[in-house]
Amino acid sequence: MSAAPTRIRQATVSSNVMCALSRGSSISSPLHDQHEIWAQACERLRSAGYAPRVARAYQKASVEIADRRGPAAAIQLADTVSMAAIKSGSSVAEDLCAKAVLVNRRYDEPDAFERWLALIGLLISRAAASLGFALKQMELLTQRLTIEGLEFWVWSGIRSSGSDQARQLAYFKLEAPEAIRGLAQAAGEASFADFSTGMEAYLAGLYGLRLKLRENVPANVDPTDYRATFSHGVISVPAAMPGLGRSELKALYRASLAHVGAHLAYSPCKITKGRLRPIQIAVVSVIEDARVEHLAMRDMPGLRRLWQPFHAAKPSAMQTAPHMLTSLTHALFAPDLIPDKGQENSWVGKASRMFFDARDEWEDPDLSRRLGNGLGNDLGQMRVQLNAKNYTVQPAYRDDNHGIWDSLDPPLADNPETVELQTEAIKVRKEENGSSRNNSTRDSEQDERQTAKPMEADQSRDTGRLIGRFPEFDVQINRERADWVTVNRYEAVQGSGDFWDKILSEKSQLISRLTSLIKSSAFGETRNRKRQPDGESLDIDACVAALSQLKMGQMPDPGIYEKRGNPARELAVSILIDISQSTGDQMRETTATLLELEMEAVAVLAAALEEVGDRFAINAFCSVGRHDVRFYPIKSFDQPADEKTGRALSALRSGYSTRMGAALRCAGSELMKVRARRRLVLLLSDGEPSDIDCDDPDYLLHDARRAVRLLAASGVDVFCVGLGATALDVQNSIFGRNGFANIATVQELPAKLAALYLKLSR
């Protein structure tokens, strides 16, 4: 092919570029200095087969970006636009150019635009199908977030969804609770997850109700219009409410749960919809809200102070259905909030008089339908129309009314986009003789991307109980994500009854020797024993008391000496056993697996510590993604080490992965509750951190290192016993040079573990 057409096209593009420059800026653009490179970038986009509008959008956007960020940023944008067009399509690439201009104007940091392009590159490589939806949210995101917050939110979406395209789409469409919660956290705002535990207790205290609480994000709804809803024994609340401070959000959630609780306590049956029109349904719902609130305030007058701040009359000349229903809501809460004038005053006043005149009938749930039916007809005669699809219940703490009708229930129980925040559900009514218990299930979602294929551990047949949610550190953004990892407690099944006796018999000499050595080791604070009959020095206080007794003619106490006591062993140890799938491998020169050797070594150490009297706990762990880090309690600090401990140890089975940082945080948090002069987490592991939902080898390594350092800052030492052919550089990176020991010949583990403990406890 002749080069002439190419030269003609380049000349044409160069001419167009120069014209664009002159139109795009009244002063000389920085792109004048590199217009040849820019012209080539424009030509690549024009001739690559993308829609022509992509090159035009880039050409227009790059002029403005170059004026503020320099020509390098504008030319770099061309590469990103090209990748977006290839992976996500021309329409997305065109929108990318428009959003680049938005970001260029919104962020003032010198490197903000380059960091934003890096995020777009991340989305193209990891979530190309979601890029278009993320760009559609960019106006909202850049309004609420700094560039650091935007990085946090995007990386949270990548980490939480893995390669699951459906979850990616839900996140970047802002239709997943995690997306709303992450947005609030990135913006420095609170979310429902910050208050969930207290809210459960609050609801139980008011009405004797303990229900499943879930956070939910209704699809295609403005965030300011989110409302609570309830059905099928589940209360679903907004994951977050933009623009509210922490105290305001907490008050809103409390008011909302108190209102939903009033429905559950004072509405014994649902209202039949029948042939009611939407306007009548809305009026009946407002009256029912007022009825249950007044009954609740009758029994608990303090609730008025909770709900009162959300009710305020706001005069308006608009006579629309939403406005009139809101006015009715305020008037039924307090009659002095009736509007001052207009037909709204007449209708709201009539409704208020009818409601309060019927106060003796408030106990009757049919009252709301009787009153609302006629009042809804009045609005119809006034030609007031209601668009039910766009109607939002006011004030914000009220629920969406689906739960009080017999045919408007949303399918909360089957909604895949909800995240369950409580795994237990019981309803206790004071007027009932007993209680009913509902067994609930915990969401156990897993990412499909797997770096390994671990087998299911035999001891994990139950569903586990929530221990807590812990943060996790993301090295990419240099921040911790609060409540990112869920740790669940799984009860260990009972294994062999002979295991403990066998250890005591076969390892008796090792146990006896270790016990003697630990007892003889000097550790802890030395305390002098006072008022002794003999000793190295006089006890001054006892001498003064004896002299006083002599002067009073009494026989003095002969204990006037003090004696140096043995050092007190003020040590608490949490032994943490890695039971991931790799510990099931058979070791060379033996028929035993690594896990079996771990169990034997821990049993020997436990027997010695029980004899010495050191306080210790034993836990095993593995993980199935960040939503299910499994903790198996073998022995607590207050339990003795005995046959039951041996049964639990012998029942352990290898399985799943190693989310080390979360396990260390969980063990450390329990250890910090124990009163001791020194606290130690002793970890037995055969490898580096890994999990099925994480394909970044550095991510969990840096998180584990962060966990070790934060525990050390809190007074908890962490020491790792590396088993087998572990990567020494990884262990050194996580635990530090003096924070680990590698035992290559694992057959010697029982003896060497005992020796290590003796060294660590001094």
Image (cartoon, rainbow, N blue to C red):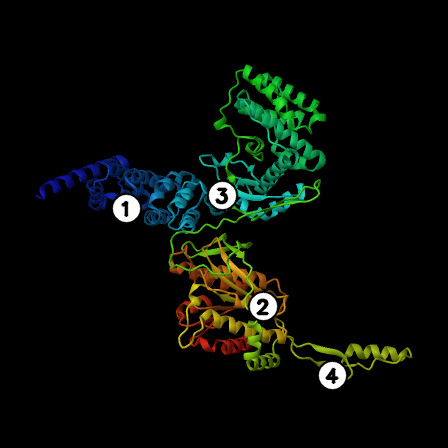
Would residue 433 appear left or right of 594 to someone viewing this image? right
Q: Quadrant of residue 678?
A: bottom right
Q: Mark 4 to mark 2: distance in Å? A: 45 Å
**Which of disc 4 and disc 1 is earlier in sequence?**
1
**Which of disc 1 and disc 3 is earlier in sequence?**
1
Where's residue 547, x and y in %?
85, 79
Q: Quadrant of residue 550?
A: bottom right
* Residue that mark 2 sits on: 645
Label 2 element class:
helix
Q: Mark 3 to mark 4: distance in Å? A: 70 Å
Q: Nearer the viewer, mark 4 or mark 2?
A: 2
Q: Which mark is residue 83?
A: 1
Q: Mark 3 to mark 2: distance in Å? A: 38 Å
Asked if residue 667 is positioned above or below residue 151 in the image, the reply reads: below
Amino acid type, label 3? Thr
Dot 1 alpha-carbon crowd within 10 angstroms: few under 14, some 14 to 19, many 20 or more: some
Would residue 464 appear left or right of 138 to someone viewing this image? right
